[in-house]
Amino acid sequence: MRDEPLKQQTDIARAAALIADPSRARMLKCLADGRSLPASALAGEAGVSAATASVHLAKLVEGELVTVSRQGRHRYYRLAGADVSAALEALALIAPPLSVTSLKQSNRAGALHRARSCYDHLAGQLGAGLMGALLDHGALTGHDGVHRPDEAVRDRPASYGRDIRYELTDSGREQLRQLGVDTDRLPPRRPAVGYCVDWSEHRHHLAGGLGAALAARLFELEWVRWGAAPRVVLVTDAGAAGLRRSLGLTLAR
Amino acid sequence: MRDEPLKQQTDIARAAALIADPSRARMLKCLADGRSLPASALAGEAGVSAATASVHLAKLVEGELVTVSRQGRHRYYRLAGADVSAALEALALIAPPLSVTSLKQSNRAGALHRARSCYDHLAGQLGAGLMGALLDHGALTGHDGVHRPDEAVRDRPASYGRDIRYELTDSGREQLRQLGVDTDRLPPRRPAVGYCVDWSEHRHHLAGGLGAALAARLFELEWVRWGAAPRVVLVTDAGAAGLRRSLGLTLAR
DNA sequence: TCGACACTTTGACGTACGACGAAGTGTCTG
DNA sequence: CAGACACTTCGTCGTACGTCAAAGTGTCGA
């Protein structure tokens, strides 16, 4: 505090201001474990529009709290360093408990985690759960469905996967038929079996022609229906029962 | 991140918002080393009015980043705990360097550190330096002039001291006469030798009738003059030379 | 008891900033 | 090549908040 050789003064108010916005704070919290996530996922987590999220992320990059890496039409954001997560943790220690009103805001984030649409198929706990059930039953082979960032070559959260080639088995064809999905009537040119890396689950969910057909069938059966907010999908009571009965899939909560 | 037993969510945005204001950040920085300071000192450090500082401090108390203890008409503020200073340090690590415009704002704080008025006498480096010179020359006896919070009984920064009793020596009377201060003509009822604990220097500066008379004499000699901002005192070139010559006192910068 | 002082409260003012819709840019799919 | 998509930029709106002067409260000293 004296006028001694004061080492580089830093502007802690500016750094704090970057964290002080509730939307940005929620985004940073999601990135706190070191993941890198696309802007759209962070917008969903924060409960704001893509435009708003974009502005926030630009500020975080400008302030060097996060870095961005472009991959095709996605942009993946991650914390700039360990010192950033350290600062977040230090703040968490002195922060008051989250008020109920702010918790309500995260309802949509919770709903997105449980089940959402991804292009024309299903994602979230529901999407990854379906994939897991298909693998457990031997309907699909080729991988265990878990995304491991270290081993991933081109696979990134929230986009189509390329590292792995899943195969539909004869048994799988039969199981899907019983659900009402005719695997012989899939669109011709489109690859039947594809997958995405689910950003909220760190696991694969079914995509491709088959993923789209399965999603359509679940809507048809009214096992799922659209929620209020964009991309939010809700599992109906009939759906929870049906999924448990036909695939042994039980969803939390 | 999963929906697992999420321990108490905390509102890091609120905590960050408390630090995100430049004035509050400057106050917190001053308190970072554990000192407790009165509101007026913090207002000076932050470069804002007492009213503004009061609002800020109320918010910091409300947010439990600082605590307050009343002592007479003063209120002493200090950081609420070690975790608060830890958070400040963590933020300092990720903060950008302070911009020039913000540095300019701290000019007044720097000026207040160098020399300011305190009631009717002088404080800051100048005030504490004068006190030190008088002690070095044996003009005063009774203590070494350093404030030690552990040993202090009733002494607090930025208010009149009571723990110690300084005595003016015959030699001191002579030295002051040479400066033009007649120690026989001090106001009758007021104690001649008093002191305050200088909050920026952690040392004592001369107060009482003698402190006032010395300050008045230095203004009369034009060794010091008023600065632009309230309570700011500037040492003139003649003053720097005179203080060095008569008391061996050299002021930094 | 009165005035000086430390601090807070009130009220008014200006502005900085977060929010979104709509339009624009680049990239992938079929 | 056309369309869908991820993301950004632009323009506009509303509001939350920092700022200070002035007035109010409590404490100290003469």
Image (cartoon, coloured by chain):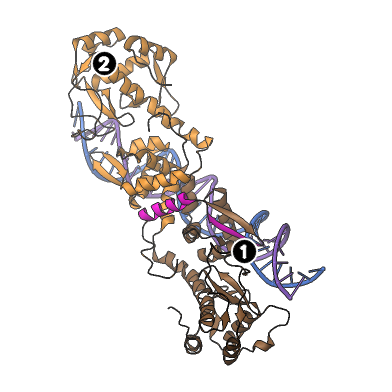
Chain colours: A brown, B orange, C purple, D blue
Q: What crowding class fits label 1: few (fewer than 14 Cα within 10 Å), some (14-19), or many (20 or more)?
A: few
Toward which corner of the image does residue A101 lie, by quadrant? bottom left
Residue type pointed to by label 2: Asp
Q: Residue at x 24, y 20 (%)?
A: B209
Toward which corner of the image does residue A180 lie, by quadrant? bottom right
Q: Position of residue B210 (x, y in %)?
A: 25, 18
Disc 1 is placed on an element classified as loop
Chain letter for mark 2 = B
Residue type pointed to by label 1: Arg
Q: Are marks 2 and 1 in contact (CB under 8 Å)?
A: no
User: Residue A6, relative to residue A56: is it above or below?
Assistant: above
Chain letter for mark 1 = A
Disc 2 is placed on an element classified as helix
Q: Is residue A242 magenta?
A: no
Q: Position of residue A229 (x, y in %)?
A: 55, 73
User: Residue B22, relative to residue A208: is it above or below?
Assistant: above
User: Residue D15, relative to residue A202: is it above or below?
Assistant: above
Q: Position of residue A240 (x, y in %)?
A: 48, 85
Q: Residue at x 32, y 20 (%)?
A: B129
Which corner quadrant holds the C terminus of chain A? bottom left
Q: Nearer the viewer, residue B62 or B215?
A: B62
Q: Is residue B55 visible?
A: no
Residue linked to disc 2? B136
Residue linked to disc 1? A154
- The residue segment tinted magenta is A73-94
Q: Is residue B193 visible?
A: yes
Residue A155 left/right relative to B62: right
In the drawing, what numbered circle is on residue B121? Answer: none
Which numbered mark, 2 or 1, is in the foreground of this view? Answer: 1
